[in-house]
Image (cartoon, coloured by chain):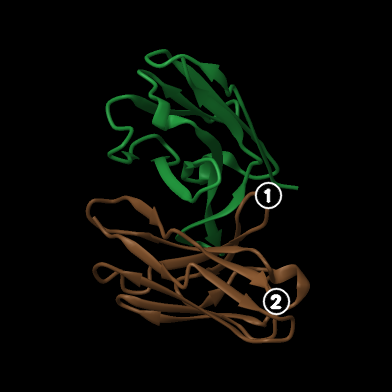
Amino acid sequence: EVQLVESGGGLVQPGRSLRLSCATSGFTFDDYTMHWVRQFPGKGLEWVSSISWNSAKITYADSVKGRFTISRDNAKNSLYLQMDSLRTEDTALYYCAKQFILGSTRHDAFDVWGQGTVVAVSS
Amino acid sequence: EVVLTQSPATLSLSPGERATLSCRASQSVNTNLAWYQQKPGQAPRLLIYDASNRAPGIPARFSGSGSGTDFTLTITSLEPADFAVYYCQQRSNWPPIFSFGPGTKVDIK
């Protein structure tokens, strides 16, 4: 069974840092682009960042560029999100999600999601 | 940057009725559009990819259509489990980023 389990969320003051982790199992992790997506309280979804299988291609939403850093460790089947200079508007539920691949075709959609980890930024 | 808008914001229907949800992109995304269902307390679930293809395990009552800037998700006969929030999502070629629409809530009339 494919599983994604996020951890590392919590309550943090503005300007501080937090590192999220996503432990994966049940699939060949280094075949897949991985993503972070967040959901604001009671509201919609926002894509945060993506990293290709070999870390060669990394992209960020403008709202987090320069503050967040995505990374992965293929030996540990794990995805990370280093969040620095946190702001109150970063308060959200953070999901990791995997790229959808069907057969040998890679699609720009997310087919498996974790249950998320809550990040609350407040003084 | 591509902006997605969804309409209506809320759709109130009864079980057995047909639901038609709209997603409009601010510029063409070809068929690079996906739809998700989200229920309270759960992560989103992929329903449709590439505008019109059902993801594995998704019932046939869900269908997607459209290309360019206008897309539709249709649920032919609503079942109790279908009352949820639905999001569309796209990936643009440049800049190579993803975005989601604000969602349509389908609730019980």
Residue B99 is left or right of residue B19, and the answer is left
**The C terminus of chain B, quarter of image:** bottom right
Q: Residue at x 54, y 36 (%)?
A: A94
Q: Is residue B46 above or below residue B51?
A: above
Residue B94 locus on image (x, y percent):
22, 55
The amino acid at mark 2 is Pro
- For the residue carrying disc 2, how many other residues have a C-alpha within 10 Å: few (<14), some (14-19), or many (20+)? few
Q: Residue at x 48, y 49 (%)?
A: A45
Between the residue at mark 1 and the residue at mark 2, the CA separation in whole angstroms equals 19 Å
Q: Choose between B11 and A113: the one closer to the eye.
A: B11
Residue B43 locus on image (x, y percent):
63, 49
Residue A76 locus on image (x, y percent):
60, 26
- In the rendered structure, the colour chosen for chain A is green
Residue A11 is left or right of residue A122, and the answer is right
Q: Which labelled disc corresponds to residue B59? A: 2
Element class at badge 1: loop
From the image, tell me which residue sits under label 1.
B42
Which chain is displayed in brown in the rendered image? B
